Image (spheres, rainbow, N blue to C red):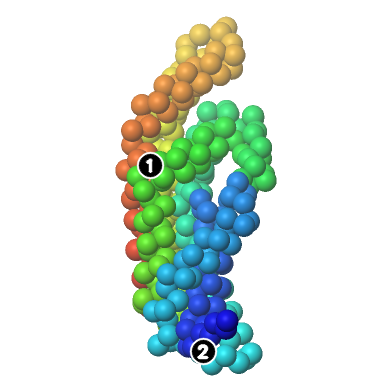
């Protein structure tokens, strides 16, 4: 028994697999170390099977040079789309890192098995919480849907480097702004706590303000972090929606 595939169909499957693999291995939550490599390969293959038949009209000849050139473009497109997803989770980890820096929690570091690097306490907490919320609101399905839609808009043999540069620089700026917005309530409260402790130090110099200030900042941080948790689902949903919109704007350019 022999199985034959049309050259255009096979070309579409191969290029879709290349882009899907590059995206899956980079974009959180699929690209983290906690997801086994075989699962990532299986997910990439499943995505390629879904969109492969739609790419016959954009197929390239089954020759080394055209396939290699188109494959490099698909890797670049997949990595760029995955990097936008990386910014989604890095925003929350960075916001937690800002809180740790101001509150003093940055003195304690945790090991993150997902990135194989040390992270601060609230940076780890916000990152894990963002991942949990993303799954709870079906944001991972939104990311997959946005990636699959990119195949409808993206030619397999063209990639605008100018658009890519503008997209990445704009998203990095948005990354810092969003992180500051997420951490702003706690940062403002910690600043007021520092100001109150400074005034107290001037009014009562005999008090050990350093010893008093540490538990006060811990109490303020934990209390306000609990009060700010209901704001995070909307932030995660908004960032996931932005990732999809930015991906499609990049692909359509």
Q: Nearer the viewer, residue 251 or 175?
A: 251
Position of residue 194 measured from the top left corner of the image (x, y, whole percent): 48, 24
Counting the numbered discs, the total is: 2
Position of residue 85 measured from the top left corner of the image (x, y, whole percent): 47, 57
Q: Relative to 9, is 131 above or below?
A: above
Q: Nearer the viewer, residue 145 or 2?
A: 2
Q: CA distance from mark 1 to mark 2?
A: 41 Å
Q: Relative to 60, is 34 above or below?
A: above
Tell me which corner region of the image, top left, top right, bottom left or bottom right, holds residue 38. bottom right
Q: Name the element at disc 1.
A: helix
Numbered mark located on residue 90 in the image = none
Which numbered disc, 1 or 2, marks the residue that appears first in the sequence? 2
Q: Which residue is mark 2?
A: 7
Q: Relative to 20, is 72 above or below?
A: below
Extreme front residue here? 1
Q: How crowded is the residue under tag 1: few (<14 C-alpha within 10 Å), some, or many (20+)?
A: few
User: Residue at point 58% right, 29% down?
Assistant: 105
Q: Which residue is mark 1?
A: 136
User: Residue at point 41% right, 60% down?
Assistant: 144
């Amino acid at each position: 028994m022999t199985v034959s595939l049309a050259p255009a169909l096979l070309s579409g499957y191969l290029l879709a697999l290349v882009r899907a693999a590059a995206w899956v291995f980079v974009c959180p939550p699929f690209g983290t170390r906690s997801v086994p490599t075989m699962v990532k390969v299986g997910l990439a293959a499943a995505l390629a099977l879904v969109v492969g038949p739609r790419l016959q009209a954009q197929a390239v000849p089954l020759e080394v040079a055209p396939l290699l050139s188109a494959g490099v473009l698909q890797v670049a497109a997949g990595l760029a789309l995955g990097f936008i997803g990386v910014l989604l989770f890095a925003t929350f980890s960075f916001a937690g890192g800002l809180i740790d820096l101001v509150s003093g929690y940055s003195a304690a570091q945790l090991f993150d098995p997902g990135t194989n690097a040390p992270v601060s306490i609230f940076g780890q907490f916000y990152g894990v919480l963002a991942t949990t919320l993303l799954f709870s609101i079906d944001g991972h399905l939104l990311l997959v849907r946005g990636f699959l839609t990119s195949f409808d808009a993206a030619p397999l043999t063209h990639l605008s480097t100018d658009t890519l540069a503008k997209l990445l620089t704009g998203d990095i700026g948005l990354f810092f702004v969003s992180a500051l917005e997420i951490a702003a309530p706690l940062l403002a409260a910690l600043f007021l706590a520092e100001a109150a402790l400074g005034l107290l130090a001037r009014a009562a110099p005999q008090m050990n303000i350093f010893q008093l200030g540490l538990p006060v900042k811990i109490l303020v941080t934990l209390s306000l972090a609990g009060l700010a948790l209901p704001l995070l689902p909307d932030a995660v949903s908004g960032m996931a929606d932005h990732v999809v919109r930015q991906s499609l704007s990049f692909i359509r350019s």
